[in-house]
Image: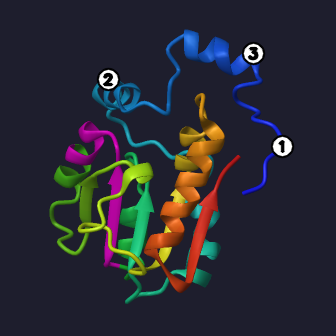
Amino acid sequence: LISHADPISSSGRARKLRNLGFTPAQSAFWDHRYTKDVEQFEWYQPFERLRNIFRRHVQPGMKVLIVGCGNSDLSRELYDMGVVNITAIDFSKTVINQMKDTYADRDAMTWHHMDVLNMDPELIPEDHYDIVIDKACFDACISSPGSKRNADIFLSSVSKVIKPQGVFIHVTF
């Protein structure tokens, strides 16, 4: 990752948002949000708008990791396409517990309370996943001071767990 400026720390608007309590790089922010608002929510694009990308790159039998899964329907949609070997992680314990309950009948899916910036290699092994999917997790990671360091850690973490010929699908704004 090459960056000459840290757009978050140099932005007065970002600082104002943090002062108002918008701190998406902190798990407490998300635990509070998912406790207060349990409705499913899709960041940036619904599955339907991304379906062709997923059909092209994600096939049944592939091992998929979804980082910063939130309460998105993405894992269910992929499962319904026949992609069942899905691991989803999020650093909000609240949302992971909700998703475990919601999708308890889909036994090939696994859910872990885990920060993408500090993945447990025993649960998320290196060179293991054919596909890693991120919808907005990277953006949350870089929304605080230290964003350049977090960006480097995020991308390094993804590169460690994805197979050499794997695909990283990154949905951002």
Residue 123, quarter of picture = bottom left
Question: At 41% from the left edge and 56% from the top edge, which residue is drawn?
Answer: 73
Mark 3 crowd level (few <14, some 14–19, many ≥20, 10 Å Cα): few
Q: Which badge, 1 or 3, comes first in the chain's sequence? A: 1
What separation in Å lies between label 1 and label 2 (alpha carbons)?
38 Å
Q: Is residue 72 highlighted in magenta?
A: no
Q: Nearer the viewer, mark 1 or mark 3?
A: 1
Q: Which mark is residue 84?
A: none
Tell me the quarter of the picture where residue 79 sits. Answer: bottom left
Q: Nearer the viewer, residue 68 or 82?
A: 68
Numbered tag placed on residue 4 in the rendering: 1
Using the image, tell me which numbered label, if any, was put on residue 12: 3
- The residue range painted magenta reads 84-97
Whether residue 134 can be seen here: yes
Pick whichever, 105 or 141, lies toward us.
141
Labelled disc at residue 36: 2
For badge 2, the amino acid type reads Lys
